[in-house]
Amino acid sequence: MRINKISVHRISIPFNWQVSHNLYNGTETEAIVVVAEDESGLAGYGEGTPRIFVTGETLDKAIEAAYSLAGRLAANEFHTFKGLADYLEITGSLALSQQYPSAWCALELAILDLWAKREGQALWRLFTQKPAPDPYVYSAVIPVVPEQSLSQLLNMVKKLRLEFVKLKIADKDSGISTLKLARENLGSDVDLRVDCNGAFSPDEAIAFIEEIQPFGISAIEQPVPKMDISGLRFVSSRSMVPVIADESMCTLEDAKKLIEQKTCKGFSIKLSKCGGLIKCLKLLDIARANGIFCQISCHIGETAILAAAGRHFYALSKQCKYLEGSFSKYLLKEDIVTKDISFGLKGHAPLLTGPGLGIEVDESIFKRWITD
């Protein structure tokens, strides 16, 4: 395969409602889409969602990095998948790739999608012949919204009969109110967990966990700010429920440090945050070897490109405790694919078996939302 052309695009699609939490407040997507073409004009697609509060990336700088990295990939020729994978691993270890993981994620996914399409096989088959069995069960992720909107979202969760729900919280009082309303609406059988996005000090986090004990949550995510590793360890050592690291765990080095310091019980792995599929597979191996459970997660505003990639990632994961994503039809005004792949009743979604990512980008819709 010869990589003949790589293009990088900024896209923006409105949300159906305002999305917010302690670190983010938005009304539309903020994403990079990379298109890689071979000598025949066949195209592969990749997506990255830079979030400055997670990895320090701005959209503009991530796009610059994507262009720079694309220059290293374009015009290269690969004859075996091993040769391609080795090259991607080397390029992904460059300082620029590590500084801008969402840019590298978009590039890597586009190349992998292209290769798998040329081979006429699903992307996950590049790595295994035995994927995790489907259906895959997704969690609802509910942002910080006014009570009326929260009630509407909880009713949607109830109607879809979802088994897993993650609630974003802004502070102690509103967090307790949110959990109370969720339990009242959803009953005792639904698995509830909370994502604090660094809202608390260590002592505040412990107090909050004690107060919400009657609501029976299954985990608490990022209770303290990203850089407060000692605080994360303090909370995890005293918490009655498992603590998941999200913003504090972006790289392989982060993961190793958190494990060495016994800082948490779970990792939230996101393709864009962690720099693409190959690095995320390594994170899974490290976590599994050290008794850390994993949550395959996503950034708000992902299109079907990253949603599909996340599902292929889950197919390779064998076992993860929670799965998030694939909810573009519930959030985006419009997605850029011809066939929706969002989860349905009970959060269920199938293994994707079509060539590459298993999706078809609608070029007319895609071009409508490009904001270059």
Image (cartoon, rainbow, N blue to C red):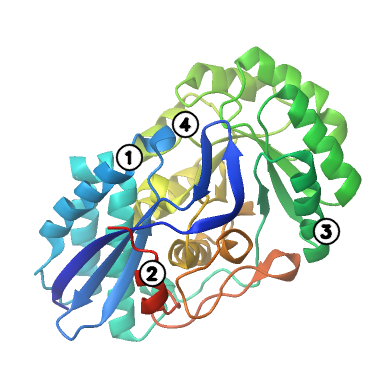
Q: Which residue is mark 1?
A: 58
Pointer 4 and pointer 1: residues touching (CB < 8 Å)? no
Q: Earlier in the sequence, mark 4 or mark 1?
A: 1
Q: Which residue is mark 4?
A: 248
Disc 3 residue type (three-letter)? Lys
Q: Give the CA separation, mark 4 to mark 3.
A: 32 Å
Q: Give the CA separation, mark 4 to mark 2.
A: 36 Å
Q: Secondary structure at mark 4?
A: loop
User: Which disc is residue 158 wearing?
Assistant: 3
Q: Give the CA separation, mark 4 to mark 1.
A: 18 Å
Image point (60%, 46%), residue name? 18
Q: Position of residue 364 (x, y in %)?
A: 38, 78
Q: Give the CA separation, mark 3 to mark 2.
A: 34 Å
Crowd band around label 4 with a 10 angstrom C-alpha radius: few (<14), some (14–19), many (20+): many
Q: Give the CA separation, mark 2 to mark 1.
A: 23 Å
Nearest to viewer (mark 4 / mark 1): 1
Q: Earlier in the sequence, mark 3 or mark 2?
A: 3
Crowd band around label 3 with a 10 angstrom C-alpha radius: few (<14), some (14–19), many (20+): some
Image point (25%, 82%), residue name? 42
Whether residue 6 is visible here, answered yes or no, is yes
Q: Which residue is mark 2?
A: 368
Q: Secondary structure at mark 3?
A: helix
Q: Quadrant of residue 9?
A: bottom left
